[in-house]
Structures are given as structure tokens and as C-alpha cells.
Image (cartoon, rainbow, N blue to C red):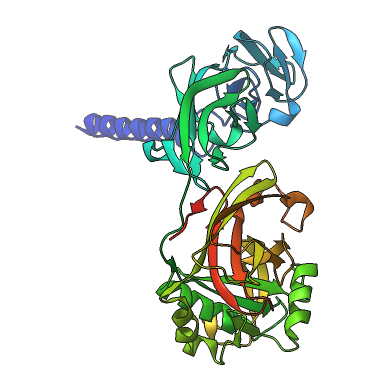
Amino acid sequence: MKFHKLLNVLTTVFAFILFFSCSSAEEPGNSGTPPPVTTVTSISLTVDNSTCLTGDTVFFQVKTNLGTTVTSDASFTVNGSNNSGFTYTPTSSGVYTVQATYNSIASNDLLLTVNEPPTITSITMSTDPLNQQLQIGGVASFTVIANYSDGSTQDKTNECSLIINDGVVNGSSFLAESVGSFNIKASLTPQISNEIIIQVSNVDAPSAFTKKAIIEDYTGTWCGWCPRVSYGISLVEEQTDKVFSVGAHIGDFMENSYSNSLKDAFGVTGYPTAYVNRSAVWAYPEPNNVAQAVNQATGVANVGLSVGSILDGSTIKLLVSTGFNENVSGTKLVIFILEDGIIASQSNYTSYYGGGSNLNNFEHNHVLRYSITDVLGDNIDTSIGVKHLPFSVNLAANNFTSPTDDNPNPYSNAAVLAFLVDDSGKVVLNAQFSKVNESMLFD
């Protein structure tokens, strides 16, 4: 009996010792989990684009098995030849094998597929069918689409030139300067498009001309009260499209000899000052006197204008047509080239445009850049009928904003304001306005 009790005790002790001897393997550091990897044993090579075109630049990346990026410390070979840096620009099509090495460890082989870019197989030109029958002074604009070898298409209008009866215009618009038939094709070297025929007919003056008006705003970015007039002009433009404004800048980078000539001719000494039709100062506060300007553009007149213009590279070509239903002796013609969309900070003492002492990135529009005529007008033929006057101005040489990376084609912001004045040059009889590559015919 005593022997059995002793055997049970010994069995229990043995089991207890065996349990704790096995559990010692569970102590920290001896859990059975492999120790963390701290050594670089392999690297992986990837590329941002495994299929590209000749001339494209691809970027390689190298990571270790630890997840660390070591691209800048790795060396690369392309088809077995050493490559400088972790970028590559293929010059011919094919399949390239790329490999990276880091600390004598070689990466996986990476396959880079390079294709030749699709080529232009033809170009197609189109226009609104209404453009195929124009009056003198009208403008036809064209769209040019390139067709590629892979079946894709792309708008190339801004990169083309026009072949007009064997003459070339560096743009995508046609100005009807004379009566006749014009065969027009687009050119995107070496491709030539289909041909479109434009028929241009003569134009007669209407029995009466719609009355238009102008506002000449003497202003400057330094002038804190000037936003008041700018705001007033915006209110006028909301009510009518028959009143055209001119920003004559003084004392800032938009100032020029033409704005100064206007200032001197009208004896402007305070800013802002604005004239309506040159015959009256716009009454203060201008935003509360919108009717003064709007009322000048009502009814009809016995003289009128048509304006059409196109852009030929940096040159604006225009045709101004005058119409007289009676001989108004002494009438003069003024032609201004304006620029829209000039961004510059504007001082502000007003509550307009949200208030604040400075209006950052303020958009200045209708800025006077060039006057083809004297600012008070040139003498013209005032006999009854229609006369056509062609002009050409190189914008790059005449105060216009120069192209930049952010604004590669500022010339497209050009506009033409033509108006007829009396023999003093200080009373406006009628006006017409047209943006570049557009036309406003007699109305």
C-alpha cells in the first residue's frame, strides 16, 4: 500500500520536471520563430512603364529584400551594356533586357518593350458649311485633324498653316479681303489636306447702322480707386454687347505712347477717369450710372463699320470696312488693337471685387496696346457707299505680351476696336469690335 503511494508521488514529480524542462523552450528568444532578416540577400528591379515608345524616358527602381529602395546606389545594364543612371531613353524599337546590380547582387531580368510612335498618314480639314459663302470682311475658321497609322486621331489645328490660292497663312483662319473664289488647303509638313473652296461676295451697306458706343478708361494698377470703373464696365457689359471699353493704362507696365497721347489729348489728370463716347466724362460713381453708357448705344446711325481679323503667326491682319449712307464730311477713323487677359495685381481702395487693399491676379481686359491710326483719328473717304481698308500689325513688335511656357499664344487674346469720330476726334459717331479670328459685319 505504501509502495503504491510512493510510486504515485514519484510519477507526479517526474511529470512536473518533464513539463518544466519542455516549457523552457518557450522562454523569450527561444519561441521557435526564425530570427529577423537583417542582411540584403536579393534585389528586385521594376520600371514605371514596361512598354514605351522610342524617345520616351523610363525610370527604373531597385528595392532590396528588406524593402529598402537603393535605386541611386545601384548600377544598370541594358542588353549587357552599362547604362548611366536609373533612366533610359531608347532610340530604336525592340525588346531590351535590363538588369541592376547592388553590392554585387544581381537583380531579376526586366524586359522593356519599345515601339515606334505612330505616324501621321493624312490630315483632314473641315469648316462650318456657312463659311463657304462669305461676304468681304468675313472670317472662316478651320479645324485640322491628323490621322495616325495606329488608327488614332488628334486635333492639330494650332500647328498647321493654310495654303490659300498658293499663298500661305500661318494660322487656321481665312480673312475674306476681296471678291472671288479661294481654294484652301491645310499644311502640316509633309501632309497636305483636302481642299475647301470659299466663295466671297461683295457687301452693301444696310439702310441704317446699329448704334454702338465706347468707354475709354484711364487707369493703372497702382490706382486704388480704379477698380470702381472696372466694376462699372462689367455692369455695362452685363446689360449690352454694344458698348466697347478701352483700358488706357498710365504709370504701370501697360502704359505706352498711345495711352499717353490719349491722356494728353483729353487733359486727364485724375484717376480713375472714364469718358463715354469721348464727349462726356462718365459720372461718379460709375457703377451707379450704367445707363449713361448704355443709352449711348441705342437707336441707329447713318455711318457704320465692319471689322474682320485673323492671326498670321504674330501678325494680326484685318479688314475694316466703312459704310456711309450720307456724306458726313470730316469723319475720321480710329483703329485700336486691344489685349485681353493680362493678369497683374491691382491696388484697391473700394469694396468692389470683395474688397481688400490688393487684388491679386486681377484680370485686365481691353488694354490699349497699339493704335493703327492717330488716337484722334485719320482722315478717310466719307462719300456714300462702302470702302474696304486692309491693315497688318506685328503684335510681337508693338507692346503685346510675349509668349511664355504658361501662355504660349498671347496673340490669340488680341481684339480690334474701330470707331468713327467727328473732325475733332472727340465725338464718337459709331463703333465696331471684333476679337481676332472673328468678324463683325455691318449691322
Looking at the image, the residue that sits furthest to the bottom is 284
Left or right: residue 54 compared with residue 269: left
Give the side of residue 29 with respect to residue 372, left or right: left
User: Visible in this render: residue 1?
Assistant: yes
Residue in the image at 60% along x and 69% along y: 420
Residue that appears at 67% across and 67% down: 344
Measuring from the top left, give residue 188's x and y in whole percent: 60, 24
- Residue 290 higher or lower than 83, as above or below: below
Res. 221 image quadrant: bottom right
Q: Tell me: 99 left or right of 260.
A: left
The percent coordinates of residue 175 (x first, y second) are 56, 42
Relative to the observer, which residue lies in front, 181 or 105? Answer: 181
Q: Considering depth in this image, is 201 or 362 the residue closer to the camera?
A: 201
Q: Going 42% across and 66% down the picture, which residue do you hit?
A: 208
- Quadrant of the drawing holding the N terminus: top left
Pinpoint residue 6: horizontal percent, then vertical percent: 28, 33
Q: Residue at x 60, y 50 (%)?
A: 319
Q: In which quarter of the image is residue 356?
A: bottom right
- Judge by depth and name the residue closer to the eye, 103 or 298: 298
- What is the total number of numbered labels drawn onto the structure image? 0
Residue 31 in sight here: no
- Name the quadrant of the C terminus: bottom left
Left/right placement of residue 394 relative to residue 116 reads: right
* Residue placed most toward the observer, 64 or 176: 176
Where does residue 117 sit, x and y in percent of width and height? 57, 17
